[in-house]
Image (cartoon, helix red, strand yellow):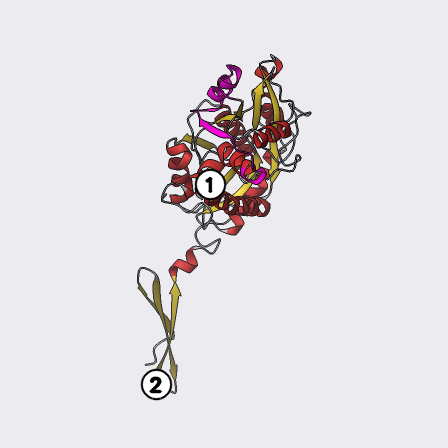
Amino acid sequence: MEKEAGIEIRILKRRKWCRMEITLTYNKGGREMKMSVFAVCFLMSLMVIPGLTYGAGDFPTEPITYIYPMPAGGKGDLGARLLMKCAEKQLGQPIVVMNRDGGSGTVGTAAIAAAKPNGYTLGNLGPSSQVLIPYLVKLSYHPIKDFEFIMQYGYNVYGVNVRYDSPFKTFKEVIEYARANPGVVVYGSTGTNSAQHITIDKIARDEKAEMIHVPFKGGPTANMAAIGGHVTMAVGEVSVPLIQGKKLRCLAVLTDERWPDLPDVPTLKELGYRVPVPMFLGIGAPKGVPEPILQKLEDAFTKAYKDPELVSGMAKLGIPLYYRNRKDFSSYIAKGYEEVGEAIKEMKK
């Protein structure tokens, strides 16, 4: 009696691969014949193929966590929450903002890098934790290799501020005076090796203008020192109320473009000075998120960036909007990281 033809499949699984044996049984001339085919499947490779674990078309199917690496309540935190609210409209899922402060932003940034690369954990990226501190402290993450850079949406505004009745009306006047009077000009910043300190140190070296640096705990403290006449100038936050109240005069800003709130104040770049530290507020993800999901996230956040609610809300918070797509944002940070490294090496000479 002849047996019916049939197929038997056996799978031997291992942690990173599996062996699949397919046996085809059939009859030929009254004799039972068997033919086996072997295949090896690398499971780790299969897992990153969209559609085998989850389809990009279905993403997201659950809430997304957004890590903000600074304390809650500040204008940066409020701006990030507003952006996430607008992005929820595009993604169709809640985005839960989680504050993970500490280490000048490095604690939360490390949590972003260590998350599963599935698109469900994103986070806020800034210059301190991304291009400055990695040169000064050993961290658990690499600031470039361990991240996907999805989009830049804005930047912090830092400027060179002097007391309103200061004799200096331009930043060039400060540099010329410092060159002619070594060690007389004293400037305060938000701290040693801060973006402000590295920028002014770089300019002073290039211009051969010797100035004395005094670190403060923050921009507001440095501004108060300038108002009180304790330092020649403060390099930190730009306070519009203090400028409008004729307590401070802003000579220049450290941004790529002029700030709309102070349209008459030039940028240091306009004045011909090199600013080695990139200024940005951006969205990142852990390295390895599948390309289709990255593209979907970029598209969603790009649409959210144009939301009238975001535009008006950021204007009220005093956060300038600035857009760079995934490709441009990645290049911008990589270049900035290299330039900061060069500037820090010069400072140590």
Which of 100 and 36 lies nearest the eye of the viewer? Answer: 100
Residue 219 forms part of the magenta stretch: yes
N-terminal of the pair, mark 1 or mark 2, is: 2
Which of 125 and 139 lies nearest the eye of the viewer? Answer: 139
**Spatial separation of the CA atoms under disc 1 and disc 2:** 85 Å
Residue 143 seen from this side: yes
Q: Which residues are magenta?
A: 205-231
Q: Is residue 259 above or below residue 282?
A: above
- Mark 2 highlights which residue? 31
Which residue lies most toward the right here? 264
Which SS class for mark 1? helix
Instruction: Name the residue type under label 2.
Output: Arg
Residue 251 forms part of the magenta stretch: no
**Quarter the C terminus occupies:** top left
Instruction: Name the residue type under label 1.
Output: Met
Q: What's the residue at 50%, 21% (across, down)?
A: 231
- Mark 1 highlights which residue? 347
Tell me the mark number nearer the camera, choosing from 1 and 2.
1
Label pair 1/2, CB-CB below 8 angstroms = no
